[in-house]
Amino acid sequence: MFFDYSAEQQDFRDSLRKLIADRSPLPAVRARLGDAHDPDLWRTICDEMALLTLAVPERDGGAGFSLEETAIAVAELGRGLAPVPVFEAVLAIEAIVRTGTVAQRQELLPSLLSGERIAVAAVSGPDGLDQGAGPVTASPAGPVSSAGPASSAGAATPGHALTGSLRHVLRAHVADLLIVPALAPDGPGLFVVERTAPGVTVSGPGSSFDLTRPVCAVALDAAPAARLGDGPGPDLDGLLDVGRTLLAAEMTAAAEACLDAAVEYAKRRVQFNRAIGSFQAVKHGCAQLAVEIDAARAAADWAAMLAAARDPGLRTAALIAKAQAADTFTACAGWNIQVHGGIGFTWEHDAHLYLRRAKADEALFDNTFRHRALLADRAGL
Amino acid sequence: MDVSYPERAERFRADVRAFLAANLPAGWRGLGALAPGERHDFERAWRVTLAENNMLAVSWPAEYGGAGLSDIEQVVRSEEFERAGAPTGTENDGFGIGLLGNTLLVAGTEEQKRYFLPRILSGEHVWCQGYSEPDAGSDLAGVLTKATLDGEVWVINGQKIWTSAGATANWIFVIARTDPGVPKHRGLTFLLVPIDQPGVEVRPIKNAAGYDLFCEVFFTDARTPAGHVVGGVNNGWSTAMTLLGFERGAEVTTDPIRFRRDLDRLLELARERGRDAEPRIRDELAWCYARVEIMRYRGYRGLTRFLAGARPGADGAISKLIWSEYFQRYTELAMEILGLDALAPPGAGNGGALKVADAGTENSALCWAEEFLHARAGTIYAGSSQIQRTVIGEQLLGLPREPRLDGGPFRDIGKPATAPALGG
């Protein structure tokens, strides 16, 4: 009977939190608002911390921990809005581990786990599809198109050509590989596409609302692609539930960062000859959000536990965690601005970076109302 | 993380299930399915059965009449009883066993434990709680009830209020002021007082739903022996807070079971009335489902920490806010689902249940209407939502306290700090 972080997990969390605070404080995050990518931090995270390997089984070259530890890692990076594509890469790696053949895993995973190459999963919308853009279609390529295969020959050799457009692929501008859900004549599949392959056009990041995790548009015009796996259609719902679980962990930690900032300011800011945090109007607002954070933390940890165990209960728990965390993060990010007053609504202040992340995270995999609608269906209400 | 229970707890769970199967009446559907007359007789006989089978205080040492098992068995007992819709005792047992008995185990003298604990379990002593007063609710340390030592007895004068199950009790634990010359928290004493004496009068108060669930208790030269003090004279605040620490012990794992059972009843109501597919109703139902699940997750976390020896501080305040605020939103949804039936709700009521209705209660409109009314009390009793938020803000978040106007000797509170200036 133990539902909490183990001592080892707490140590891991604390050391990662310290690393992010030292190496990527908010001024450093702000200095990279353009591409939101810090290659040095990425190297440290991949080489020293081996964060991408945590949930990968040892047979696939991973560290053989679990998604519990991955969720802790994603949470700590989210807490600091760290400019590295860990959430995206972990989800792409999870897709390959879950779906790929032995040969595909052997070919693709080593360079992805080491961070030498970056894969992102293009699964931002509901059902993993990019809302409003229509599904990407996959045609069997037959003889490989005139442009030739982009990847080396082997298990991940392109056998399909993808056509369609994706408008909201997280951090595609730093990706080497894209994992794209697409509809083939014989059913849906997950496909691996090289970003530099012919027929692939990545635009952006341009006008992303979330300045610390930008999105790109990806146009695919008969782009050569390799289908992951050789069995029936992939369990895209299962992959999305892992995404929701990790995002819930991120949002909960980022919500804590917002409340911490609000509380810290409320202790310092003096009006009417008193610290404003002594006024119940401010104190109770902070307390109510601490309650919601506690609830979000419980739901996120529960989902992570089930995801790590591949427990079917994740089908509802991931939705509960995502919905709770989204409501909580948005409320905390907004409250942080409110407590800071005018200074909180300036470009220079970091508060809006979190509010932007909150609303972007909320929209990912569909909004909270739709999450609850799906929960009602899955729970049989 | 792993939420499976240890093997010995699961073995005990099987014992509890066997006990329930052997002792509950055939066709048992829950306390709520009994007719009002049957209910009283059942509760009385059931209390005897529980005492005879050591099911009342599972974690108390055997030398004081308990079953001599550990905290996790106590939790398992409560979970299985809740699942079966079987009471774990009377409402007074919540005060006698859950609050006072547990407090005596940590703060009582050996003599007090040997005298009181077996009598609590046998049912000879039936307890209620004398905390709130008309002028001391949220400001509990401001109690005015006075106790003075007269030789070998305390003489008590004053009034308590909102005393749940006071009408069925024959003992009351009282926070009384014993030294008005020191700051308010320091001059209090925790006293054990027999009710069956001329100086104590208990009067029922009808609540907003029409039930007599709480009382006011008047003390007029009431007496209790000098030794019936828990935790030392003028140290009553500490004892009072120790006791409140037990208030939300077992609830963390049993509340989600109760709320889930009742949510299933609400889902049934929504389906019966063809409202479950309406997007707004469905959204609210899903929110309720998620909240109860979150309570369940938090229950496991609370249990993890409880078994590791931690006692809930600000964490208890969070639990209280979550369930009580949930309960209001949830019962408001029920009223919405009732539609026009909310205007003149037919059927049987909720039996006066303070939280959700007992298992087996008729799924009637009146039951929901009464549950809706009782939910208003949840954010007031056992520390109002506002007090809980202050506790969280100050103890968990470390926000500064408000400037206090009630420092110094208790008897001087509210008096001008200096003599008012003369006019002219």
Image (tube, coloured by chain):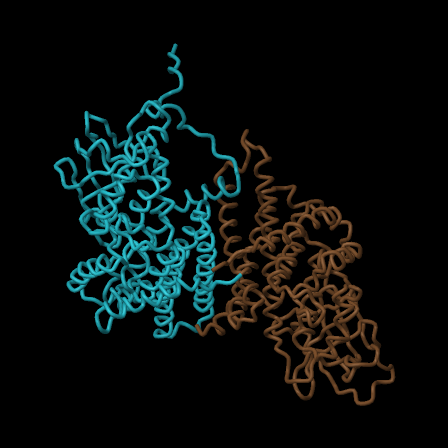
Chain colours: A brown, B cyan
**Looking at the image, residue A167 lies above or below residue B409:** below
Which residue in the rendered view is the most extreme toward the left?
B198
Say whether residue B407 is left or right of residue B45. right
Residue shown at the point (23%, 68%) measured from the top left: B24
Of residues A286 and A70, the one drawn nearer to the viewer in this rendering: A70
**Looking at the image, residue A289 lies above or below residue A47:** above
Of residues A310 and B159, the one drawn nearer to the viewer in this rendering: A310
Which x, y percent locates residue B99? Answer: 31, 47
Which x, y percent locates residue B18? Answer: 29, 69
Which x, y percent locates residue B393? Answer: 49, 42
Say whether residue B225 is left or right of residue A351. left
Which x, y percent locates residue A108? Answer: 76, 73
Which residue in the rendered view is the most extreme toward the top?
B424
Q: Quadrant of residue A161?
A: bottom right
Q: Is residue A222 visible?
A: no
Of residues B308 and B325, the one drawn nearer to the viewer in this rendering: B308
Quadrant of the drawing holding the C terminus of chain A: bottom left
Of residues A352 and A41, the one drawn nearer to the viewer in this rendering: A41
Residue shown at the point (63%, 42%) measured from the top left: A342
